[in-house]
Image: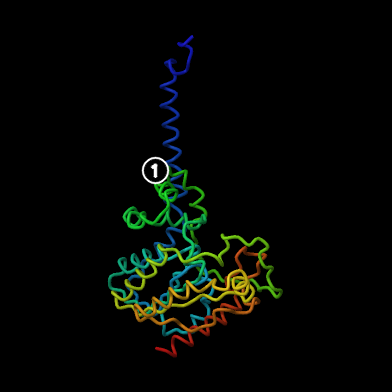
Amino acid sequence: MLKNLFIFNSKFPKAFVFCLCLLIILEASIYVFFIENNPDIKELDKLLHRNSKNVDYIFLGSSRIRSNINEETLKKYRNLEFVNFGFGGAASVPLYFILNRFLNNNPDMKIRHCILGLDKQHLVDIYSTRFREGYLTRVLTFSEFREIKGYLPENSKKIYYLSKIIPSYRIPDSFLVYTVYKNRVYKYPGFETRMNLYNDITSEHLAFKDPLELNMKYTEKIIEFCLSNDIHIQLLINPLPQSIYEEHLLLNPHAFQKMDNFINHLCKKYQVELIQLPRVLPDDKFQDPSHRKDPTHLNRKGAIYYTELLIEKIIQDK
């Protein structure tokens, strides 16, 4: 009877080897076609190589920096060279390494000014969404991962190792890893009615979250990196819709206090300037919530208005 079991069947080792070979071929194919040739990663590589052309202003931040800075408005200033490194889901960790690579890839290039966009979403959250897992599994090199792994939960470490060993594990990230939004213009008309306040008030709501140690550490590292490379850096707090700002204060009157304390600490410690622009704008300057679950990104009209304010401010203060 035991002889009939598959483990004693002489055909089993051959079938096992055959299946293993098919699996290896499948994983290799996935790596080549879905990961190695991912267009977003190639687009990032193009962005990181400038052929040593100098940059007057580099904008650094999450998708809010990408959507809030209007490219058409920037083109009016033909005597200034702008680069927008605003990436969907990016917090301080990937931004630090991307900026580092940007300078390493262009050793003769000079960056004169860096504007680092900050907001509560940027500071309190990392690797909790698929986009942020994408940075962990798709963007960070092994040496970069080793630098931050002491701050990561065990599950995030497991995600990184699995993604490197098993290419098929990374298929979702190969489609959802951040997009550089090249030449993308936000055209949502915005909304006119007030947003509905959250019915479920829980400790998971953004109003109750504090800045994450890892994000604070790498925000400081970005500033230190700029200062050590003779880059004049300024901080910018990305604006919120009036209704969302009021919602936060309603749920927690001290919702922004720890973030503000941290930013004030940065300004004093490093003698960097916080650009004084409105932190709250009318709801109709933001994207329609029917298009986004998180309508904290300016629409086209709002981005033009905000970019004009920003450029006027930074050029005036030069």
Please identify the residue farthest to the right as the structure is shown: 193
- Indicate whether 49 appears above or below 279: above
291 displayed left or right of 80: right
Q: Position of residue 43 (x, y in %)?
A: 44, 62
Look at mark 1 in the image and give the residue it sits on. Answer: 165
Please identify the residue farthest to the bottom as the structure is shown: 316
Placement of the C terminus among the 4 image quadrants = bottom left
15 displayed left or right of 101: right
- Say what secondary structure mark 1 lies in: helix
Q: Nearer the viewer, residue 13 or 195?
A: 195
Q: Nearer the viewer, residue 259 or 187?
A: 259
Instruction: Specify the quadrant of the image occupied by residue 304.
Output: bottom right
Q: Position of residue 194 (x, y in %)?
A: 69, 73
Q: Position of residue 260 (x, y in %)?
A: 47, 75
Instruction: Specify the quadrant of the image occupied by residue 143.
Output: bottom left
Tell me the amino acid under the disc marked 1: Ile
Q: Nearer the viewer, residue 227 or 141?
A: 227
25 displayed left or right of 208: left
Q: Residue at x 43, y 27 (%)?
A: 18
